[in-house]
Image (tube, rainbow, N blue to C red):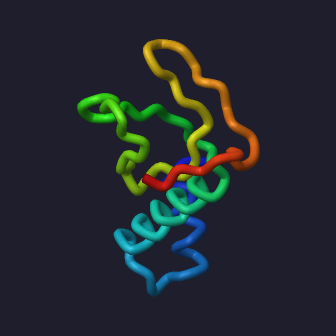
Amino acid sequence: MDLAEILEILRQEHPDVGMSQMIRMLNRASDDFCTKTKIIESSFTLPGGLVADQRYYDLTDDIIEIKGIDIADEETPQLIGKPKKRDFT
């Protein structure tokens, strides 16, 4: 089903809603679906790279989950659970 078909069905059910508003609502629903299902995967590179003795980094708000980390072209092992000793510095 393409956008024109979806809009035609919506127009029949909601004749008072404008076309541009329908498209905005469909885009918002699509974004919401993709976020909740985590269907879109992408990669992120830290601007400036890693900094010595820095543990925490600011990430963009569109990152939902981190599935893995690569450092110097090697995948780091994933920690499952909480570490024995925690560092909040």
Q: Nearer the viewer, residue 71 or 43?
A: 71
At 45% across and 86% down in the image, what residue appears? 16
At 38% across and 77% down in the image, what residue appears? 18
At 64% across and 47% down in the image, what residue appears? 85
Residue 33 location (% of width, % of height): 60, 58
Q: What number of labels is visible? A: 0
Furthest residue toward bottom = 16
Furthest residue toward front = 85
Residue 4 location (% of width, % of height): 49, 55
Along the horizontal axis of the image, is 32 left or right of 18? Answer: right
Residue 8 location (% of width, % of height): 54, 65
At 46% across and 60% down in the image, what residue appears? 27
Q: Nearer the viewer, residue 8 or 59?
A: 59
Q: Is residue 41 above or below residue 14?
A: above
Q: Quadrant of residue 39?
A: top right
Q: Is residue 18 above or below residue 48?
A: below
Residue 32 location (% of width, % of height): 55, 62
Along the horizontal axis of the image, is 39 left or right of 71? Answer: right
Q: Nearer the viewer, residue 56 or 63?
A: 56
